C-alpha cells in the first residue's frame, strides 16, 4: 500500500528514538569504543561507565542550563515511581506534612492519590467536570503551609500542557522513554537544600539524598538506559538544543492542529486551545466521544500505510507524536481514500 | 602483550553477556523482526512487546520449573530495591510485623537494616566475627511468629553460597545484571497467597499485588532490559538449561579454587570450604588481608593481558567470574612472570 516500507512511529512512550542514535548504539553494541565489551557488560564502577554517566549529566546540564545548586539523579521506577518518591522525600520538609496538587489530568490525579499515602494532600483547583481546560492561576486555592506545590507540565494522556507557571522549581522529573531515550531510567533534577527530609520509611534506592551522595550509584543504575539517554541528549545538542526542539514541536503540532481545526468537525480535539500539548494530541473522529467504526478504520488503515502507535490511551483514544511526517502521509491517505 | 586482542570480562555485575546474545541484539537493534522499529521504541502495550515479555516469562518458568501458583514479576530497582520491597509487601502478613534475617554477608546485612524501617527484625545467627562461615542450621534462633525468613543464597561480595536450605520458598528475587541480562530489570517470583498484605505506605510501582494484577505493566517496564533478559534465558535453554549451567559453574570455579588451594599460600581464600561461591571468588594475595603492592600489580598486569573487572569490592578485594578462561590465561601469565 505505502510507497516506502519505512514505519512511522507515533508511540507516545516508549517513543521514537532518532535513527542516528540507534545506528550508533548498534555500531557500539558488541564493543564500546576501546573497552572490548558492550556497555551492558561494563561495571557501573568502571572508569568507562563513570565517563558515560558524567558526560550524560554534563550534556543535560548544558541543554537545560541547570544551576549548580541542583543535583541531577538517574533513578529507576519511571514517573509513577516518582509519584511516591516525591512525597516520601519532600513532604517531611514542614511539620504539617501537607502538599498542594494541581490536578489537571490522569497523571497528576494519580500522583495526588499516591501522595495521600504519605501526608495530607490539597487539590488547589476547583473540581473540574472534565480535563479539558486549566483554570486561571488567580483562581487556585494555594495553602501557604504546604511543603510543596506539585503540577504536571504535560498531561500526555489528556493532551494538555501548562506553558508557563510563575514559580521557581524545586524538583523536575522525567521518564526518559518519552523523549530522552529508552525506558528504565528516570531523570530527577532537585535543589540541594531540599535533600535530607525523607520520611523514615523511604526506600534507600529512591532516597534523593542517598542517591545524590552516591552520584546515582548507591545501587547498580540502569547502565544501558543511561548510555542511550546520553546519546539522545548529545543528538539533541547537535540539532540546536532545547530552543530548536521547541520550534520543531510548535511546527509539527500546529500542522496537526490545523488539520483538526479545518476538518469541519470530522476530527475533534476537546482540549481548550490555550493549553493544547505540543507533544501529545489526543483527538476523536466525528464525535467528541469518538465514532467506534471510523476510529477503528482509521487505526487499521493507518497501520497499512506504515503508521504505528496511533492508538492512544483508552479514555481519549488517539494520540500523535512525531507529527510532521504524519500530516504528509495523512494527506496522501485522504486523497487515496477519496478515489 | 596478549596474543589476542579479545577482552576477558570478569566483572561481577553488570557481568558478561553471551556473545551470541549481543550479536542478535545488535542485529535487531534498529529493526526488530517485522516491527520496522527498535525494541526500545515499541509501546509497552504493543502486541510485539507483549509477546516479548510473555515469552521471557515462559522461558524463565520452563528453566526454573516455576509452579503455576507463583507469579513472575519484572520490576525495577535491583536487589537493593527489593531490600525495601520485601518487608513493605510481606511484613504485614502477621500482626507482629516481625521478620527473621540470616545475615551471612554484606547484602543480607544491608537487607536486614532496610527491613528495620518497616518492622521488627530478628537476626537468627549468633553474632559472627567475620563473614567467612555459615553456622549450621541447627544453631539458628528462628522466631515461630516471624512473617518470613530472609536469606541470601549467594553473598557475592563475600563469595559465599548456601547450597541448600530445607525450606520451601515464598519469594525469590534477582537483579538481571548478574547473569540474566543487563541492569535495569529485577526478577521477582512470588507465591500468590503472599500477595495482598502490603503496608499502606508501599509505593504502587513496587507493590507486588498491583504489579501482578497488571502483569508487570502497571507502569512502563524497562522494556529493553526485559528483551535482553529474554535473549539470555533463551540462550541458557539452548545451552542445556540450569543443570548444565550448574555443571559449568562447578567446573569453572573448581579450576580457580584449585589454583588458590595449590598456591602454597600465595593466593588466599578466607571463605570456609563448605560455603564457597561458584559465581564469585574473592581472594587476596600473599596475606589474608592482602598485600597492597602485589594486588595492585596483579590488577595492572591482568589488564595488560586483556582481563578486566578483576578488582572486587573494596572490603574483599579481588572477585572472579567466568573463571575457566581466566585460569588458562593466568597460567600463561605465571610462566611469563617467571622468565
Image (spheres, coloured by chain):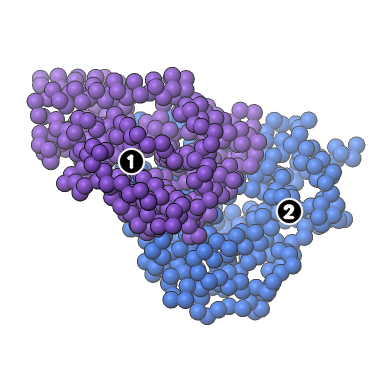
Chain colours: A purple, B blue
B163 is higher (above) or lower (below) than B46: below
Q: Badge 2 is on which residue? A: B316
- Picture disc at residue B273: none
Q: For numbered disc 2, what is the local secondary structure?
A: loop
Residue at the spot x=41%, y=50% of the render? A147
Residue at the spot x=39%, y=47% of the render? A148
| In this rendering, position of residue B156 left or right of residue A135 | right
Using the numbered discs, state the Cα–Cα distance from disc 2 to disc 1 in whole angstroms: 46 Å
Q: Residues within 10 Å of mark 2 (few under 14, many from 20)?
A: many
Confirm whether residue A243 shows in the render: yes
Q: Badge 1 is on which residue? A: A152
Q: In this view, which residue lies farthest toward the front?
A: A144
Quick one: quadrant of the C terminus of chain A?
Answer: top left
Residue at the spot x=36%, y=45% of the render? A149
Q: Quadrant of residue A308?
A: top left
Q: Relative to the observer, which residue lies in front, B190 or A271?
A: A271
Amino acid at each position: 500500500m505505502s510507497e516506502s516500507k519505512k514505519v512511522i512511529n507515533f508511540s507516545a512512550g516508549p517513543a521514537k528514538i532518532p535513527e542516528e542514535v540507534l545506528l550508533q548504539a548498534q555500531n557500539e553494541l558488541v564493543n564500546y569504543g576501546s573497552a572490548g565489551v558492550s556497555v551492558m557488560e561494563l561495571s557501573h564502577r568502571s572508569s568507562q561507565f563513570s565517563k558515560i554517566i558524567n558526560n550524560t549529566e554534563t550534556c543535560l546540564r548544558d541543554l537545560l542550563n541547570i544551576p549548580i545548586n541542583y543535583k541531577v539523579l538517574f533513578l529507576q521506577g519511571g514517573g509513577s515511581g516518582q509519584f511516591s518518591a516525591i512525597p516520601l522525600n519532600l513532604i517531611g520538609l514542614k511539620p504539617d506534612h501537607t502538599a498542594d496538587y494541581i490536578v489537571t489530568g490522569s497523571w497528576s490525579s494519580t500522583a495526588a492519590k499516591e501522595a495521600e499515602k504519605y501526608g495530607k494532600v490539597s487539590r488547589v483547583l476547583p473540581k473540574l467536570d472534565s480535563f479539558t481546560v486549566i483554570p486561571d492561576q488567580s483562581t487556585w486555592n494555594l495553602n501557604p503551609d504546604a511543603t510543596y506545590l506539585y503540577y504536571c507540565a504535560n498531561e500526555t494522556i489528556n493532551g494538555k500542557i501548562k506553558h508557563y507557571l510563575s514559580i521557581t522549581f524545586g524538583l523536575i522529573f522525567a521518564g526518559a522513554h518519552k523523549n530522552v531515550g529508552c525506558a528504565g531510567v528516570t531523570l530527577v533534577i532537585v535543589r540541594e537544600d531540599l535533600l535530607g527530609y525523607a520520611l523514615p520509611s523511604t526506600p534507600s534506592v529512591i532516597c534523593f539524598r542517598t542517591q545524590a551522595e552516591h552520584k546515582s550509584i548507591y545501587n547498580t543504575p540502569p547502565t544501558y538506559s543511561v548510555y542511550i539517554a546520553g546519546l539522545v541528549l548529545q543528538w539533541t545538542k547537535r540539532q540546536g538544543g532545547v530552543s530548536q526542539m521547541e520550534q520543531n514541536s510548535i511546527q509539527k503540532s500546529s500542522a496537526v492542529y490545523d488539520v483538526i481545526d479545518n476538518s469541519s468537525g470530522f476530527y475533534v480535539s476537546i482540549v481548550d486551545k490555550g493549553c493544547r500539548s505540543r507533544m501529545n494530541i489526543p483527538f476523536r473522529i466525528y464525535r467528541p466521544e469518538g465514532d467506534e467504526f471510523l476510529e477503528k478504520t482509521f487505526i487499521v488503515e493507518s497501520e497499512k500505510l506504515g503508521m504505528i502507535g496511533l492508538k492512544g490511551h483508552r479514555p481519549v483514544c488517539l494520540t500523535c507524536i512525531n507529527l510532521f511526517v504524519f500530516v504528509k502521509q495523512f494527506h496522501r491517505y485522504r486523497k487515496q481514500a477519496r478515489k
